[in-house]
Image (cartoon, rainbow, N blue to C red):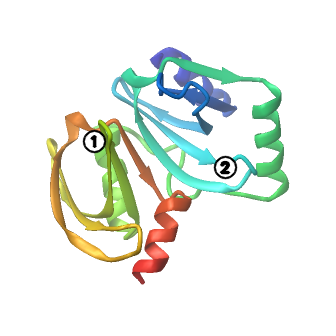
Amino acid sequence: MFEILSDFAQKHEVVSIYSNFENTLAHLTGYVLKVTEDYVLIAHITEHGFYDGYILKRLEDIYRVDNGGLYEWKITALYHLRNQKHDLFTQSESTTPLKLNIQFLQCAKENNKIISVEYGDTVISGFVSDYDENKLFVSIVDEYGNKNGNTIIYLDIIQTIALDTDTEQDILLLCK
């Protein structure tokens, strides 16, 4: 999967990525920005062609990648027709010496953005208060924008981290 996604990152083509065997219709669609041995960074785009933040997805969870279909064409066309941009990450940023997941968390913290962390059947949203090579410290914010304590999560159990998608933007607005 590393080679396949790396190729799409170089080609800068919209792809649909599947990782949920329980819901085989669910997918993430957007541009692959970066790929490491562990993670892929996706500039996520809504089904209507709008900016939808970034998704950091564990590579081992991905089982299918689609491109070149009518759906990907539609998303690409709408994204460009609506003059949408993803500006938090650039393709030229290096993934060394920092790990991609650490760069992702650093970006969230520096830009004071809400993230949503998925592991197992659990999703926690909030602000990155700190992180290290093994752990993520989150100041939890619920779906209504209320602060709700803190949590520490080990990075190796995290399947997905969403940054600045519609969901996190809504929570941030309510929090303010």
50 in relation to 4, above or below:
below
Q: CA distance from mark 1 to mark 2?
A: 29 Å
Residue 175 percent coordinates (x, y): 40, 79
Q: Residue at x 54, y 23 (%)?
A: 5
Element carrying mark 2? loop
Residue 78 percent coordinates (x, y): 81, 49
Of 85 and 170, nearer the camera is: 170
Q: Which residue is mark 2?
A: 46
Of the residues shown, which amino acid type is indicated by label 1? Answer: Leu
Q: Residue at x 66, y 34 (%)?
A: 12
Q: Crowding near pointer 1: few (<14 within 10 Å), some, many (20+)? A: few
Q: Which residue is mark 1?
A: 98
Residue 91 percent coordinates (x, y): 54, 43
Q: Residue at x 78, y 59 (%)?
A: 83
Of the residues shown, which amino acid type is indicated by label 2? Answer: Thr
36 in relation to 49, above or below:
above
Which quarter of the rendering shows the C terminus? bottom left
Q: Which residue is situated farthest in the bottom direction here?
A: 176
The mark lying in front, picked from 1 and 2, is 2
Q: Residue 74: which disc?
A: none
Element carrying mark 1? loop
Q: Earlier in the sequence, mark 1 or mark 2?
A: 2
